[in-house]
Amino acid sequence: MISKINRPAWFITPYVILFSVFILVPVIIAVGLSFTYFNTIETPEFIGLRNYIELLTRDEVFMQYVLPNTIKFAFIVGPLGYLMSFLLAWMLAQIPHKPRTVLAIILYSPSMTSGIAMTVVWTVLFSGDPTGYLNSILLQLGIVTEPVQFLTSANYLMTIMIIVSLWGSMGVGFLAMLAGILNIDKSLYEAAYVDGMKNRWQEIFYITIPSMKPQMLFGAVMAVVGTFQAGAIGVMLSGGNPTPQYSGQLMVNHIEDYGFIRYLMGYASVISVVLLMLVYGISRTTFKLLGERH
Amino acid sequence: MAKFQGININPARYHKSQLKFYLVLIPMALFIALPIIFIVSHAFKPENELFAYPPRFFVRVPTLQNFRDLVSIANESGIPFSRYLFNSLIVTVFGVFLSVLFTSTAAYALSKLKFKGKKVLFEINTIALMFVPIAVTIPRYLIIANMGMIDSYWVLILPLIAMPVGLFLVKQFIDQTPDELIESAKIDGASEMQIFFKIIVPIVAPALATVGILAFQLLWNDTSGSSLYINDERMKTLAFYFSTLGARTGNTIAGQGVLAAASLITFVPNIVIFIFLQSRVMNTMAHSGIK
């Protein structure tokens, strides 16, 4: 009996079961459903690649708004958030422990607020009536003559989504990079000076980044995933799905639109599969880019 | 020309060469803290200050009225506020405990035990770091519905327990503990379970604290579980109740104070726990690299 409970299976099974049931199997089912027509009431009907063809050739909203929005959002928020995380971590590492701890907690704090909990801040700040903070300031300064509809206008929604997401981009990856920089062996730098290293940039590119590459990679994955997770933000800010003229519509919102508003689960699954592949593909590419540079 | 000084990692005290960093970091921290300070300030504003034009950032005459309203809105709808709080506490406490336990045992096995398929499991888990849960909402719902778990506390807990990031972090951390420690315990006749609980757990406590914090954030802030899998209003969580406040108060300006109070209640436990455990988190993050 005693030897039995010492088997590796006892250590690994609970995690593996939960992982399979709630992560692995759903991914497999999503792939399966993507080849079906499924309206949640009747049994799924196999229709081959029709959903995929539909998505790529006939879904104008997807091609015109959702995909470009998702790419724009990801390619701005991902790299910028990552760069910000690294630079801030790099600076934090060069100040004493106490102020560093306080500042790091502040910079990380947005990651502890769930998106929905912060809705009220953004809706008040960017509110479209004169009592909105930004509008009130702009009106007083005479920059605008009447309040701007920041959240319900297609012109501003995306920009605000990007700002709000960048605000919250110092997450787990940021903490990892900070710890990574702090753990670099000081003698590496000393040796580099002896060898004639001349400036900060050389130092960053030849010593700092290569020495903390594992943390840089972890941070990169977290940045990619974080960016795609933040997808619900447009709906949260504008107060409805779809967002005004689809201006803030991301793939995540498109999934919800088809899955839970129109109940076309097969079609929603196709978008899910494409999204998962996109996240995976971008993570892989990031890995390659970071790996090759050094 | 002054000689290039180079980086000074983790300096012991302030030096004027650090000033340039403060000049960037402090404004940045202020910008980031602003929305959070706003929440705190807004939550304590009485109604006339919420309506004030031009709007004021800081509260002048703080009041607890918004928090009282938060409780009374729940009570009026038939579900006492305390019920939501109780649900959230149950779900969070059990969830964090199970998440830390299952994640750490699995991480230990992946790091130190020998069995078939170990490498593959870790590979799959590393790929799952890139997993976006929203993408599989539908199949998850189908599985949960077919297992008959709708309207149970389990459904709020179980889907959030297996955290690929958590397993990854703890495994990387356990990798640092020397094998000799385990070998010598085995020679003394300790079983794997004893080794795990008596030797490994104390050593990897920082990593476990980190998983605990991440699990806490996930469980405490989660609203999708309550909205998708729970029909019985009495079993929904505090975070879910807060997420419905916008609709309940009709998104009025008076409602903003209540919403701010709700945000504050959601946020405070997160930050308090993080502040207490931050040194352990940093310790864990040092080993977080993907190799």
Image (cartoon, rainbow, N blue to C red):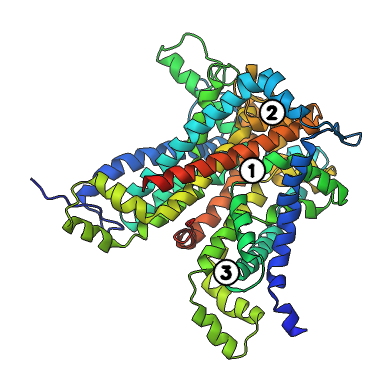
| Residue B263 in the image: above or below residue A159 | below
Chain letter of the residue beneath label 2 in the structure image: A
How far apart are labels 3 and 2 at the CA level? Answer: 40 Å
Give the mark toward the camera: 3 or 2.
3
Q: Is B81 left or right of B96, judged from the image as shown?
A: right
Q: Residue furthest front?
A: A48
The image position of residue B183, as x and y in percent, is: 54, 84
How far apart are labels 2 and 1 at the CA level? Answer: 15 Å
* Tag 3 residue: B111
How far apart are labels 1 and 3 at the CA level? Answer: 25 Å
* Tag 2 residue: A254
Q: Which mark is residue B132?
A: 1
Residue B233 visible in the shown view = yes
Give the quarter of the image for residue A201.
top left
Chain letter of the residue beneath label 3 in the structure image: B
Tell me which label, 1 or 3, sits earlier in the chain. 3
Question: Which residue: 62% across, 77% down?
Answer: B197
Q: State which quarter of the image contains the N terminus of chain A.
A: bottom right
Q: Which mark is residue A127?
A: none
| Residue A269 in the image: above or below residue B184 | above
Residue B66 visible in the shown view = no
| Residue A215 in the image: above or below residue B192 | above
The crowd level at tag 3 (other Cα within 10 Å; few <14, some 14-19, many 20+) is: many
Question: Which residue: 62% across, 50% down?
Answer: B128
Q: Residue furthest left?
A: B1
Amino acid type, residue under disc 1 in the picture: Val
Q: Secondary structure at mark 2?
A: helix
Q: Secondary structure at mark 3?
A: helix
The image position of residue B243, as x and y in percent, is: 69, 37
The crowd level at tag 2 (other Cα within 10 Å; few <14, some 14-19, many 20+) is: many
Residues flagged by tags 2 and 1 on a common chain: no
Amino acid type, residue under disc 2 in the picture: His
